Image (cartoon, rainbow, N blue to C red):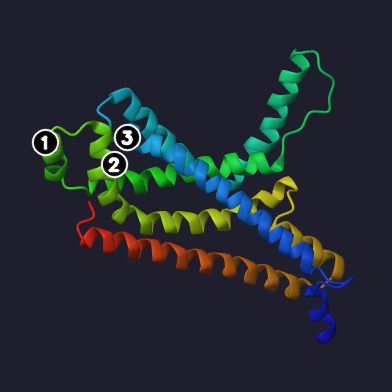
Amino acid sequence: MQADLTLLGFGPDGWGLALARAGLMTLYVSVAAFLSGLAFGTLIAWARVAGNWPLRKLAEAYATVFRGVPDILVIYLFYFGGRQVVTAIGTALGLSGPFDISGFLAGVLAIGLVSAANQSEVLRGAYQAVPRGTIEAGRVVGMTRLVLFRRVIAPQALVTAIPGMGNQWQSVIKESALVSVTGLVETMRQVAVAAGTTQEHFLFYAAGAIIYLIITTLSDHVFRLAERRSLRGHEQGGI
């Protein structure tokens, strides 16, 4: 067993450094996908609560599609479909190939767009949880839309949204493992390569599980701290 454990070290025969780099790549993919999902999800949520009927229906259709299609299929569509689109554009411009698309970019876009559909639900629910009387009171005293959002809507919606956003972040971390199908060397890809090379499958897949568990546990702690801070500000009348 001792010889097996040395494979996880940082020595000449160990995979420790490769696993650490793969763990960082998992974080890079997850953060980029989550933030892009948050940005686009905010727009989708706004469209769903806006009074404009076409925008609302378009946003609802988007959420239905990306919440109903398997994430792995979305990644395939962006990776392989993206390569075909880039090739078609390059050919039309008279450029010579080969044309390709980054596995990182395809994964971030795919997971980010799926996450946007889910985050829009969280944000929409948080907005609808803000008491209508509070919003009307802000309008009565002459607040502009920007001031009303910054001082009334956002602080109250944040209290409701943080737990749901924490769950979405955890989902994005786990979904990042699917990006391994593009060949991007993140945690799942690296442990599969290490397991296949050394034939120590249990050891490396267990190590991969521990890496994901460390990331998700630390992330959960951060979101819990943020939730407590938001609740403390809310209770103290920081709105």
Residue sitting nearer the eye, 121 or 158: 158
- Secondary structure under tag 2 reads helix
Gap between marks 3 and 2, in whole Å? 20 Å
25 displayed left or right of 156: right
Q: Quadrant of residue 187?
A: bottom right
133 displayed left or right of 190: left
Relative to 32, say whether 233 is above or below: below
Residue sitting nearer the eye, 238 or 26: 238
- Secondary structure under tag 3 reads helix
Judging by the rendered image, the residue that carries numbered circle 3 is 48
Q: Where's residue 57, x and y in %?
A: 34, 29
Gap between marks 3 and 1, in whole Å? 27 Å
Q: Quadrant of the N terminus?
A: bottom right
First reached walking from the N terminus: tag 3 or tag 2: 3
Q: Where's residue 232, x and y in %?
A: 27, 64
**Crowdedness near tag 1: few (<14), some (14–19) or many (≥20) residues, C-alpha within 10 Å:** few
Relative to 162, say whether 57 is above or below: above
Which-is-in-front pick, marks 3 and 1?
A: 1
In the displayed image of the protein, which residue is found farthest to the bottom?
2
Does residue 68 appear in this view? no
Gap between marks 1 and 2, in whole Å? 15 Å
**Crowdedness near tag 2: few (<14), some (14–19) or many (≥20) residues, C-alpha within 10 Å:** few
Judging by the rendered image, the residue that carries numbered circle 2 is 150
Q: Residue at x 57, y 65 (%)?
A: 215
Residue sitting nearer the eye, 72 or 117: 117
Does residue 57 appear in this view? yes
Relative to 6, say whether 179 is above or below: above
Judging by the rendered image, the residue that carries numbered circle 1 is 141
Q: Where's residue 133, x and y in %?
A: 11, 44
143 displayed left or right of 45: left
Type of the residue with mark 1: Val
